[in-house]
């Protein structure tokens, strides 16, 4: 079980760091909320068909309701707002702002009934991690002297972090299917409904010509479906059900490094020497949070396994 946790965590580090660039490419010629709806509708259907053919039980009515709530918070509130904001915010900067998720996660986990209280190592590690994020972002970028950050884009990203954290914490006690991939597929399917509704309500499809979709955007959506959604989101949901929340939260420290490097290589976003200093601090924070041996697995997860 412990080796599975680390494999899923490393997968999450790499995959979700690359999805910021994937989203940036996908929304070049596809409206952001519609892109998200299409991505998660296809991903959800693929996963549920696969799981049903494998003999897994489909969600009950109550479980469908739980996955609707989580899918709305995570995919509409979290991913949907990130996709919308990346129309105005560089993908690397978006990843840096989303890196505030661990703070919300640890605080909400600490105050929820029956939640896990953070250790002093987790708290210090979070502080160290945010120091690294600050160095990585740099005062110039934050102040807008080098990169003019759209105010509405920044606000949307901050709301995305809050809604993502709420959905993550809610999922820890919600009535969900035993099979984590069934949960993943159901949440994607439910989240796609909310994304499509918002796409229609905001009118982003008015005047949009589907014939203008570029091959790059199609490739971005395919990557997001197969890698970002099925591999990445599947790992995240499994980790939420099997690993401590403070450990799961560390993904947001590594993702910005991957996102900034890919943004530099493929989107002409700045990459400075201080990035490497920040990277060392951020990775150090991840190691420090878990420096007292291997991660603890929840008792319920051990029984289920």
Image: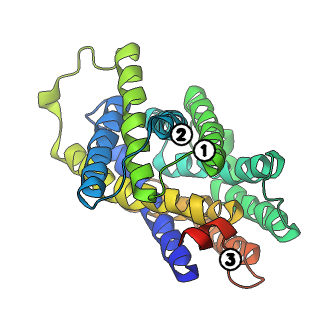
Q: Would you call the spot at circle 2 few (<14 residues within 10 Å), some (14-19), or many (20 or more)?
A: many
Q: Earlier in the sequence, mark 1 or mark 3?
A: 1
Q: Relative to 167, does residue 180 appear above or below in the rendering?
A: below
Q: CA distance from mark 1 to mark 3?
A: 23 Å
Q: CA distance from mark 1 to mark 2?
A: 9 Å
Viewer-proximal residue among 287 and 149 = 287
Q: Earlier in the sequence, mark 1 or mark 2?
A: 2
The residue beneath circle 1 is: 174
Q: Position of residue 187 (x, y in %)?
A: 44, 42
Q: Is residue 122 left or right of residue 254?
A: right
Q: Position of residue 190 (x, y in %)?
A: 41, 35
| Helix, strand or loop at mark 2 | helix
The quarter in which the N terminus is drawn is bottom right
- The circle drawn on residue 29 is none
Question: Mark 1 near mark 2, Cβ–Cβ under 8 Å?
Answer: yes
Between label 1 and label 2, give the one nearer the viewer: 1
Q: Is residue 8 left or right of residue 168?
A: left
The residue beneath circle 3 is: 295
Q: Earlier in the sequence, mark 3 or mark 2?
A: 2
Q: Residue sitting at 66 percent across and 73 percent down? A: 297
Q: Relative to 139, does residue 252 appear above or below in the rendering?
A: below
The residue beneath circle 2 is: 70
Question: Mark 1 near mark 3, Cβ–Cβ under 8 Å?
Answer: no
Q: CA distance from mark 3 to mark 2?
A: 25 Å
């Amino acid at each position: 079980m412990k080796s599975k946790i680390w494999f899923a965590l490393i997968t999450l580090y790499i995959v979700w760091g690359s999805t910021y660039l994937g989203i940036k490419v996908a929304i070049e010629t596809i409206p952001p909320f519609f892109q998200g709806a299409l991505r998660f509708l296809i991903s959800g259907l693929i996963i549920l068909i696969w799981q049903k053919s494998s003999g897994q039980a489909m969600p009950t009515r109550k479980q469908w309701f739980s996955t609707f709530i989580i899918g709305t918070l995570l995919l509409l509130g979290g991913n949907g707002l990130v996709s919308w904001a990346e129309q105005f915010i560089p993908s690397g900067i978006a990843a840096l702002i989303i890196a505030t998720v661990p703070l919300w996660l640890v605080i909400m986990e600490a105050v929820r009934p029956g939640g896990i209280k953070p250790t002093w190592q987790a708290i210090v590690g979070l502080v160290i991690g945010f120091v690294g994020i600050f160095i990585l972002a740099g005062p110039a970028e934050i102040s807008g002297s080098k990169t003019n950050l759209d105010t509405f884009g920044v606000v949307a990203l901050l709301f995305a972090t809050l809604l993502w954290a709420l959905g993550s914490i809610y999922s820890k006690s919600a009535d969900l299917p035993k099979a984590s991939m069934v949960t993943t597929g159901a949440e994607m399917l439910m989240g796609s409904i909310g994304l499509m509704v918002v796409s229609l309500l905001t009118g982003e499809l008015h005047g949009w010509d589907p014939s203008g979709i570029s091959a790059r955007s199609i490739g971005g959506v395919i990557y997001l479906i197969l890698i970002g959604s099925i591999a990445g989101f599947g790992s995240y949901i499994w980790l939420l059900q099997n690993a401590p929340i403070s450990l799961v939260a560390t993904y947001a420290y590594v993702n910005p490094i991957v996102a900034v490097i890919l943004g530099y290589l493929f989107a002409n976003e700045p990459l400075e020497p201080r990035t490497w200093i920040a990277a060392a601090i951020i990775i150090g924070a991840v190691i420090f949070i878990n420096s007292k041996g291997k991660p603890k697995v929840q008792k319920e997860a051990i029984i289920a396994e």
